[in-house]
Image: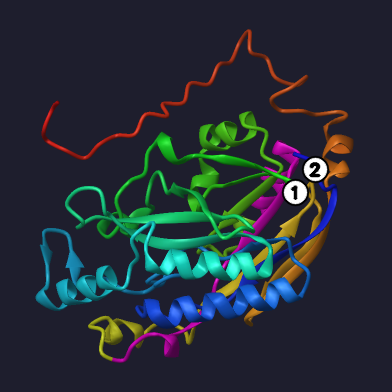
């Protein structure tokens, strides 16, 4: 595969059509088209873009009990999550093909392999031919996310070889997991995609650290969302009264392999961030540090990754 060393990427900072997968797919298609017209060959979306990262919602849960109203909220969230593959992924694939771009997008995936009751926070990868290349399921939902999402496993930690370099993704606080990062570096990731819901200042230090540690380009993508994007009839509306109008301030950014911002964090608006990438900068950065090459010490440290799919079934065959 002939590698193209110089190209443009787009990081889409936008808010979800909360709990509405039909509108969510339409917005996704529109933004892919816009980024494609902007010349982007890699287009990245935030964590849980379809149907939403449900910031501020409790789903009626306290330790030891769940409310009936919260169960109805969860059903709505579940109902607007998507199966992979499915009709929604086919539509997104068509948009990727039209834009002639690779697309990485965060979705909430409905289990279609067994009970169908479990949801996963997933990053999907589409090729410029419209094909769904694969997915990464978040390994460890953070905090209260564990109430609504299941855990991924090592079978969905791919890095894809493309004409624009090797692309992989870790979602949000997975990027604080040193061994998960090491698994990405070991596969030679060059375009490290980090869809997230974390816009705190410490996150930007992490993104710069990942770039300089992995000697890779980092594309960090967050949502910009406000309370008025949420349906009026969810039970958590009462809880929203104490929250700021701006629920997620953004903070998407693009970092080079020496840890410097190509595009500094952007706040307070929906915006597509563009950057020109030169893959030669990776080799230049690896001159004095290659975390899985000349700076590795395999005689001391070894990484084992279990890539076997962990079936959720009580039956043994």
Residue indicated by mark 1: 164
Work out whether residue 61 can be spotted.
yes
Q: Is residue 291 magenta?
A: no
Indicate the position of residue 291 as horizontal and vertical percent values.
Answer: 71, 28
Say which mark, if any, is on residue 3: 2
Q: Residue at x 49, y 55 (%)?
A: 124
Q: Is residue 109 left or right of residue 225?
A: left
Q: Earlier in the sequence, mark 1 or mark 2?
A: 2
Distance CA(mark 1)–CA(mark 2): 6 Å
Question: Above or below — where is 188 with respect to 195?
Answer: above
Start-end of magenta stretch: 205-232
How crowded pointer 2 is (Cα within 10 Å; few <14, some 14-19, many 20+) is rated as: few
Which quadrant of the rendered structure holds the N terminus? top right
How crowded pointer 1 is (Cα within 10 Å; few <14, some 14-19, many 20+) is rated as: many
Question: Above or below — where is 263 with respect to 237?
Answer: above
Question: Above or below — where is 115 with respect to 1?
Answer: below
Quarter residue 64 falls in = bottom left
Q: Residue at x 44, y 86 (%)?
A: 229
Quarter residue 258 falls in = top right
Label 1 residue SS:
loop
Which of the colour schemes (rainbow, by chain, secondary structure, one colour) is used? rainbow
Indicate the position of residue 263 as horizontal and vertical percent values.
Answer: 78, 64
């Amino acid at each position: 595969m002939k590698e193209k060393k110089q190209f443009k990427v787009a990081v889409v900072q936008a808010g979800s059509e909360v709990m509405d997968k039909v509108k969510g797919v339409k917005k996704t298609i529109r933004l892919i088209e816009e980024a494609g017209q902007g010349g982007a060959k890699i287009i990245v979306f935030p964590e849980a873009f379809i149907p939403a990262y449900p910031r501020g919602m409790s789903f009626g849960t306290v330790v030891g009990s769940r409310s009936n109203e919260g169960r109805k909220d969860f059903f709505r969230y579940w109902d607007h999550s998507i199966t992979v593959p499915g009709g929604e992924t086919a539509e997104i694939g068509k948009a990727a093909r039209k834009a002639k771009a690779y697309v990485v997008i965060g979705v909430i995936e409905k289990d279609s392999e067994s009970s169908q009751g479990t949801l996963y926070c997933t990053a999907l990868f589409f090729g410029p031919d419209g094909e769904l290349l694969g997915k990464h399921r978040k390994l460890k939902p953070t905090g209260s996310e564990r109430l609504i999402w299941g855990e991924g496993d090592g079978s969905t930690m791919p890095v894809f070889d493309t004409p624009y370099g090797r692309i992989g993704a870790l979602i949000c606080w997975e990027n604080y997991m040193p061994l998960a990062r090491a698994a990405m570096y070991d596969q030679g990731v060059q375009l490290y995609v980090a869809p997230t819901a974390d816009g705190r200042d410490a996150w930007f230090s992490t993104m710069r650290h990942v770039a300089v540690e992995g000697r890779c380009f980092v594309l960090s993508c967050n949502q910009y969302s406000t309370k008025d994007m949420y349906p009026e009839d969810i039970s958590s509306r009462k809880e929203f009264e104490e929250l700021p109008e701006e629920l997620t301030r953004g903070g998407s950014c693009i970092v080079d392999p020496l840890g410097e911002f190509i595009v500094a964090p952007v706040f307070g608006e929906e915006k597509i961030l563009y950057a020109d990438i030169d893959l030669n900068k990776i080799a230049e950065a690896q001159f004095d540090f290659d975390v899985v090459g000349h700076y590795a010490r395999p005689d001391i440290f070894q990484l084992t990754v279990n890539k076997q799919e962990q079936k959720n079934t009580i039956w043994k065959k």
